[in-house]
Amino acid sequence: MTDPKPKRARPSKTLAPTAAAALDSDALTQAMRQLLEPLAALSIARGVPFATLDEMLKSAFVDAARAAHPDLPGHRAVSRISTTTGINRREVSRITRARSETVPTRRSPAARLFTTWLTDPALKTRRGDVVALPRQGPAPSFEALAQSITRDVHPRSLLDELCRLGMARVENDKVYLLHDSFVPQGDVERMLRLLGHNVGDHLRAAVTNVLSDITPHLEQAIFTDELSHASMDDFRELMRTQWKALLAATVPALQRMIDVDRAAGRSPDHRVRVGLYTYHETVAAMRESAAPAATKAATKRKPT
């Protein structure tokens, strides 16, 4: 079943403003609870105390309020941010003084090399399998591929990095890819960066769609709760196949767009992220995780 874009309801009677606001508040509360629960689980698993998250949330609120009122002069910004967020002025001033600009993280040369190798038709067999590459020499070779990605990092350094991440191996002076996706198991720092970038952009897309009159970002899902445990292997294989197809079609197309933009002298001032995610759990686990919120909501609705 697909999760279509909801249509605007046309009730026979217009809801009173207070009732409409209550419905919106309830839906917003439930949505935000679902967003926060995985974050809380990650914090507990990694030993991050609530005070740390509380400080980060305050900082995020200050940034969001500042972005909502970008034209306010400095002497008025603190008061407006305090009013908007509910954080007292002293805290807003402290956070504003301590806030440092975050430098955007660019995709690593190793990740770019891996993706190019995986998707370049010239580096595949007739059956579509990724070929092993000679370590050195003219194209096609690992050395030539690395130099096509960057001249700032030595090919041997890129090879060492891929081998360290368990993404490639060297045998008889040939380099072999070991995986069909760049998921560097064992590198916790890199995995956490991927988590932040991937989930962060997904959430930004969904929130922007909710807050906009139009839906500028594609953000859809397919869901069902009628599969058996025996079907899960088939499901995972289906999704891996679909991702390979999306990757093979998208990366060369994006590279062509980049080449056309460069040739036309256009400013490279936009970025995109394309992803596909799956999540599965037992129906019992889903009901158990939803039970506390449902119980709380039911208790709240009890007549006094």
Image: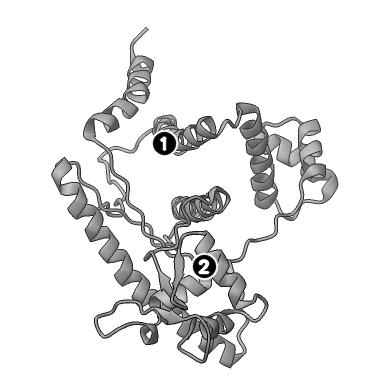
Q: What element carries label 1?
A: helix
Please, is residue 237 above or below residue 168 in the view?
above
Q: In which quarter of the image is residue 83?
A: top right
Residue type pointed to by label 2: Ala
The label shown at residue 34 is 1
* Residue at 83% across, 48% down: 74
220 sits left or right of 106 in the view: left
Q: How is the image coloured?
A: one colour
Residue 150, horizontal then vertical, whole percent: 61, 79
Q: Is residue 227 at least partly visible in the picture? A: no
Q: Specify few, some or many for label 2: CA neighbours under 10 Å numbering under 14, 14-19, or 20 or more.
A: some
Q: Nearer the viewer, mark 1 or mark 2?
A: 2
Please, is residue 3 above or below residue 119 in the view?
above
* Residue at 44% across, 52% down: 206
Q: Please tell me which residue lies in front, 134 or 74.
A: 134
Residue type pointed to by label 1: Gln
Question: In the picture, which quadrant includes the C terminus?
Answer: top left
277 sits left or right of 216 in the view: left
What residue is pinned by disc 2?
Answer: 111
Q: Please tell me which residue lies in front, 264 or 214.
A: 264
Residue that extends furthest to the front in the rendered view of this protein? 172
Residue 50, horizontal then vertical, whole percent: 60, 27
